[in-house]
């Protein structure tokens, strides 16, 4: 599979439906044919940040960012 196929439309979300923070819908936009409408609760659910502990939220965000950077470097 080539880069264009992987990064086009909603390929990533088809592979990871648990990461969709809301409901997908089609648009007439050429550049954004599929969009997501969700709430703050949806985003918090997907990111896993449900705790009121600020330090824990920061640690989770840093860990997820480090994981994301590692995945990008291995592509």
Image (cartoon, rainbow, N blue to C red):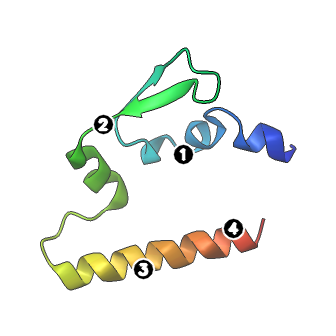
At 45% from the left and 48% from the top, the residue drawn is 19
Position of 62 compared to 3: left or right?
Answer: left
Mark closer to the chain start, 3 or 2: 2
Q: Which residue is mark 3?
A: 62
Instruction: Return the residue nearer the eye: 18 or 69.
Output: 69
Q: Residues within 10 Å of mark 2 (few under 14, many from 20)?
A: few
Q: Secondary structure at mark 2?
A: loop
Q: Secondary structure at mark 1?
A: loop
Mark 3 vs mark 1: give the one in front: 3
How far is disc 3 from disc 1 in space, using C-alphas?
Answer: 21 Å
Mark 2 vs mark 1: give the one in front: 2
Residue 11 sits above or below residue 59 on the image: above
Mark closer to the chain start, 4 or 2: 2
Q: Which residue is mark 1?
A: 16
**What residue occupies the far left of the structure in this picture?**
52
Look at the image and tell me in which quarter the N terminus lies: top right
Q: Which residue is mark 4?
A: 72
How far is disc 3 from disc 2 in space, using C-alphas?
Answer: 23 Å
Q: Which residue is mark 2?
A: 38
Mark closer to the chain start, 4 or 1: 1
Res 13 → quadrant: top right
At 26% from the left and 55% from the top, the residue drawn is 44
Residue 26 lies, in percent from the top left, at 50, 18
Residue 23 lies, in percent from the top left, at 37, 29
At 76% from the left and 71% from the top, the residue drawn is 74
Position of 47 compared to 26: left or right?
Answer: left
Instruction: Return the residue nearer the eye: 67 or 34.
Output: 34
Residue 17 sits above or below residue 65 on the image: above
How far is disc 4 from disc 2 in space, using C-alphas?
Answer: 26 Å
How far is disc 3 from disc 4 in space, using C-alphas?
Answer: 15 Å
Look at the image and tell me in which quarter the C terminus lies: bottom right
Residue 46 sits above or below residue 49 on the image: above
């Amino acid at each position: 599979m080539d880069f264009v196929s992987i990064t086009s439309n909603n390929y990533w979300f088809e592979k990871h439906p648990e990461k969709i923070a809301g409901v997908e819908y089609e648009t007439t936009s050429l550049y954004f044919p599929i969009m997501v409408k969700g709430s703050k609760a949806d985003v918090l659910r997907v990111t896993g940040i449900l705790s009121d502990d600020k330090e824990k939220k920061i640690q989770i965000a840093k860990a997820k960012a480090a994981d994301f950077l590692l995945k990008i470097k291995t592509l």
